[in-house]
Image (spheres, rainbow, N blue to C red):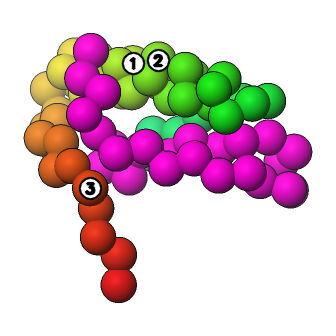
Amino acid sequence: MSTKYEIIIYWSAEDHCFIAEVPELPGCMADGKSYQEALKNAEIIMQEWIDTARDLGRHIPEPRGKLLYA
């Protein structure tokens, strides 16, 4: 599994959990009751996202590393 994708983890007061987003993989996100659980779940979901994209013949973006926001 490639964990070279950037993962952004933050607390969501609305959802009462940590949210982990993978911006380079559209729609790829997970949650967890703790920071560590959200990270673990994100790693699982990233692999599932990649496997599904591969099975459907869709483009899988190369990890870009740190993203810059304006």
Q: Is residue 3 shown in magenta?
A: yes
Q: Which residue is mark 3?
A: 66
Is the residue under label 1 in contact with that under label 2 (CB below 8 Å)? Answer: yes
- Specify which label sits upstream in the sequence, 3 or 1: 1
Q: Quadrant of the C terminus?
A: bottom left
**Which secondary structure, mark 3?**
loop
Residue 13 x, y percent position in the rendering? 86, 56
Residue type, label 3: Lys
The label nearer to you, 2 versus 1, is: 2
**Vertical arrangement, residue 57 with respect to residue 23, above or below:** above
Question: Which class describes the residues within 10 Å of circle 2: few (<14), some (14-19), or many (20+)?
Answer: some
Is residue 60 found left or right of 20 in the rendered image?
Answer: left
Q: Establish if 22 lies above or below 31.
A: below
Q: Who is closer to the viewer here, 36 or 60? A: 36
CA gap, disc 3 to disc 1? 22 Å
Image x and y of residue 63, in percent: 18, 42
Amino acid type at circle 1 is Glu
Report the span colored magenta. 1-26
Query: Which of 3 and 55 lies nearest the eye of the viewer?
Result: 3
Give the residue number, with chain letter if any, for mark 1: 48
Q: Residues within 10 Å of mark 3 (few under 14, many from 20)?
A: few
